Image (cartoon, grey):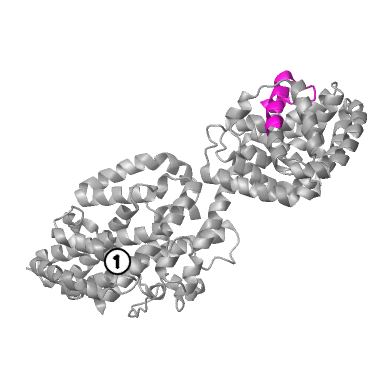
Amino acid sequence: MASKHTIATRHAQGIRARFASRFLRSLLRVRRSSNRFGGSQSNDEGIGKRIRTDRIKIAAYAAMARAVGPRRTWSRALLFKLRNRARIHGVSRKRCLVSEKKRVTRNKVVAISREPSRADTLRKLVPGGDSMDTCVLLEETAHYIKCLATQVTVMQSIADRLLL
Amino acid sequence: MINRALLPAGGGENMLHCTDMTVLERQRARNKWQQEQQQQFQLQQQEISYFTELVDVFHQAGFHEGGLSEVVTRSVKPDPGLVDNGWNNDRVVGYGVGLPYNNGLGFELNYGAISRTSSCPPEADAAVAAATVKGSESVVSDKISSGAGRESSKKRKVDKIQNNSKVVAEEDTRDKRIKGCAEQGESKITEKNNNKNSRNNNTNKNNNSNKENSDETSKDNSKVSEVQKPDYIHVRARRGQATDSHSLAERVRREKISERMKYLQDLVPGCDKITGKAGMLDEIINYVQSLQRQVEFLSMKVAAANPRLDFNVDNLFAKEAFPACSINFPTIGMSSDMTNPAYLQFNPAQQQLVACCGLDMGIDPPDMALKRTTSAPVSIPETFLDPSCFTQTHPPPTWDADLQNLYNVAFDQGRQTSFQTQPFTGSIEASNLKMEM
């Protein structure tokens, strides 16, 4: 099989590189913050691990969204969601949910009468999928799948290296 | 609606529209099928004479279609789509030529190559007839219906025909189709295009009008060919269909969706044999869910390995080239839908998936983790999230530079560059020490 850098176009490699750099940076930040809070304890405790897991997960998604940039609807929606969650943990999230619902209501009002179709399930999966019609949803899903797969491979290799 | 105007009676405006269309189309066709001109010169001669005879007959409503269909069958060429595709309506609009001009031009063009394109052949033939006998309004009207439809559709879609890639794609497809059908006298296609164009008049939503034409051409070929005569004959029927803009818009929408689904079929591994939107959507949903689960599982793994981040940092950065992953994840558990045999192929061979996911990805497909991802509870609210994760804290200034250099080098070379980490190691470890303390 041809090596990765021959298969990858500049675009894909760019995304991978950007994502990897951002992710690693944020990993270090997470590590720093977890050390700051609990010292070595948070590394071992169950709850601490879960917290860190979630932080790492969020860091991964944020890194990917930033690497993609505001070009894509799903990355914009993801960044928006993450920023709101980060800013004020509880309050603004509720506010934003309300505003999101208002934004989305028009589309959802039509959908309420039907049972959740596959497209609706997909909308829940893809960030920002609520405010897309089916055609755009499929396009965004394709790009999202590509980026998710990139993310997974980068994280796999990072985890691999860390464990070795 | 323009189609209403496309009565056999024919109007001046309609003729104009038809003229614009046909002139432009003919120009294009002429450029492309000059070869066929020579081939069919004799045929043309025959046809013209034949046409003059038929023109009188054409006056009568019932006969248009017969004569024209005959003529059309002789006239070879396919894809009005091709002609439509490349045009801007600016050009079309700029043309408001009178009918006589059109007829003359059509006549001339018809000489050039009856096999010429697209929507024109019937129009061209009609034009020939009209030129010779200028009373054949009925013929022209038939032409008009097809041409005007196309033209008006084009005009309406001026703003929307900005499809860069799609237009190019359409042109390509149309070129191929034209060449493919070139020798088959498929007036069916032209008729079909005519029909489509007239129908397209009424859809104002068509961003991909050209594409739609081409797609419809390819898809409706069988239908139209069977009912060639009726479609061509019943201008009124076509008109009735055309007024149903909903069906046209739906067709465009359906085609868009099916195109995207095909693209997704290439992306999602294991979807070769799945036909139908429902199954594909299920697969897509499963795949996205599995990828998201994988991300979570990997984040858990990274979190578990995090205490050792400082140790392996230099290795980490050095080996960011992502060689083939030979991962041995501990088997934590398997969610039920991971037993989906569709994903079993992930496990051993990464290369297969790379081939499957071929579009610009160039990555190792997620393999092992798929089988071993867990449905770990994700219920912990993210309120613990440290805002500092997202604010740009201050890593040491040398850090990022080294990072970027390292990444560029590593990614370009695609191999371990451990020897390059030596100069970085010192700063990295120093910063790590700072962070730990």
Report x, y in % for residue B210.
Answer: 61, 40
Q: Is residue A103 left or right of residue A56?
A: right
Q: Is residue B330 above or below residue B425?
A: below
Q: Is residue B10 magenta?
A: yes
Q: Quadrant of residue B364?
A: bottom left
Q: Amino acid at mark 1?
A: Val
What's drawn in magenta, residue-wise? Answer: B1-24
Q: Is residue B268 magenta?
A: no
**Residue placed furthest toward the left:** B437
Mark 1 surroundings within 10 Å by alpha-carbon count, few (fewer than 14), some (14 through 19), many (20 or more): some
Is B177 or A106 nearer to us in this picture? B177
**Residue placed furthest toward the right:** B53
Q: Quadrant of residue B435?
A: bottom left
Q: Is residue A85 left or right of residue A32?
A: right
Q: Using the image, name the chain to which the residue with label 1 belongs.
A: B
Q: Is residue B186 left or right of residue B97?
A: right
Q: Is residue B328 visible?
A: yes
Quadrant of the image containing the C terminus of chain B: bottom left
What residue sits 78% from the left and 26% below the top?
Answer: B103
Report x, y in % for residue B46.
Answer: 90, 37
Report x, y in % for residue A30.
Answer: 18, 63
Q: Which residue is mark 1?
A: B409
